[in-house]
Image (cartoon, rainbow, N blue to C red):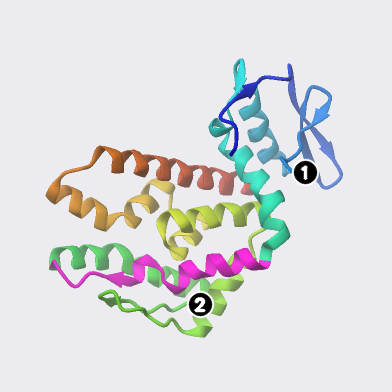
């Protein structure tokens, strides 16, 4: 279990160039991942990670450093099993939430169609992935050619972007929305709302649950971290 805080053990934070990227320096020591791997980053991302470490007070709070967590995951876990992760992310395309429409009430079905159909069109235009949509809970077998196109789109992400895409697709339960976020076609706020049309519809009818809202806010924050990483990688 990751510690929630540790005593601050450094005084200064800086960014230094090295072969293949930039490293975050804590005093005279380069920041490494939990498995002690080197952490070479694009400059804008290195600066943002460094700022997370500068902002810590008397105690270092890992949960308050989402970019650090993402880059550590990318190096320690995503890179070594990249092909497995790509297949896992593709699974969100095989059962993409925006392909499944409720049969009733008709008001919700209409909301889903109006909100989600444009993104299915986007996936076809930008990735050559034509996905089926249908009502009910029966599994939709998506065309293999479309899945192959989506897999190529996933594989085009480097390990850092793939980590963020994995998170974004998981939060929204939608590979299409994750890819749109990665491409800068949609922001985290809109992607999150699109992914929760069902939940928001039910909440409007029956009221909101405080515990469920707290979970939703944590998921939204995770999606916002993914969006920020995508933007930093393009800086």
State the residue in front, 112 or 221: 221
State the residue in front, 61 or 96: 61
Q: Which residues are magenta?
A: 83-105
Report the residue at 25% width, 58% height from top: 198
Is residue 139 at all visible to an observer of this figure? yes
Report the residue at 76% width, 34% height from top: 31
What type of secondary structure mainly makes up the magenta span?
helix
Report the residue at 80% width, 43% height from top: 38
Label 2 crowd bin: few (<14), some (14–19), many (20+), radius 10 Å: some
| Secondary element at image label 1 | loop
232 w.r.t. 58: above or below: below
Label drawn at residue 209: none
Q: Tell whether label 2 touches label 1 (CB within 8 Å).
A: no
Residue 199, position in %: x, y? 26, 53
Report the residue at 63% width, 24% height from top: 6
Separation (CA) of disc 1 from disc 2: 34 Å
Q: Count the marks: how many?
A: 2
Residue 73, position in %: x, y? 64, 48
99 w.r.t. 55: above or below: below
The residue that label 1 is drawn on is 40
**Residue 84 is drawn in which quadrant?**
bottom right
The residue that label 2 is drawn on is 128
Is residue 184 at all visible to an observer of this figure? no
| Secondary element at image label 2 | loop
94 w.r.t. 20: above or below: below
30 w.r.t. 138: above or below: above
Residue 187, position in %: x, y? 43, 49
Quadrant of the drawing holding the C terminus: top right
Label 1 crowd bin: few (<14), some (14–19), many (20+), radius 10 Å: many
| Residue 101 is a magenta residue | yes
| Residue 156 is a magenta residue | no
Q: Is residue 223 left or right of residue 78?
A: left
């Amino acid at each position: 279990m990751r510690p929630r805080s540790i005593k601050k053990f450094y005084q200064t934070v800086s960014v230094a160039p090295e072969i293949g990227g930039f490293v975050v320096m804590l005093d005279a020591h380069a920041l490494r991942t939990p498995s002690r791997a080197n952490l070479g980053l694009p400059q804008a991302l290195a600066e943002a990670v460094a700022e997370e470490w500068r902002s810590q007070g008397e105690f270092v709070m890992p949960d308050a450093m989402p970019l650090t967590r993402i880059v550590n995951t990318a190096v320690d876990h995503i890179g070594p099993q990249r092909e497995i992760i790509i297949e896992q992310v593709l699974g969100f395309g095989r059962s993409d939430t925006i392909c499944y429409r409720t049969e009733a009430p008709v008001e919700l079905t209409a909301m889903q169609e109006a909100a989600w159909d444009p993104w299915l069109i986007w996936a076809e235009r930008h990735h050559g992935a034509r996905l089926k949509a249908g009502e009910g809970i029966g599994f939709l077998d998506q065309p293999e050619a479309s899945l192959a196109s989506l897999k190529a789109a996933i594989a085009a992400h480097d390990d850092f972007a793939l980590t963020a895409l994995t998170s974004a697709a998981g939060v929204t339960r939608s590979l299409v929305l994750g890819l749109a976020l990665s491409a800068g076609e949609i922001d985290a706020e809109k992607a999150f709302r699109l992914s929760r049309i069902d939940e928001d519809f039910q909440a409007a009818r029956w009221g909101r649950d405080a515990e469920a809202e707290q979970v939703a806010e944590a998921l939204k924050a995770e999606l916002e971290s993914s969006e920020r990483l995508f933007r930093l990688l393009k800086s």
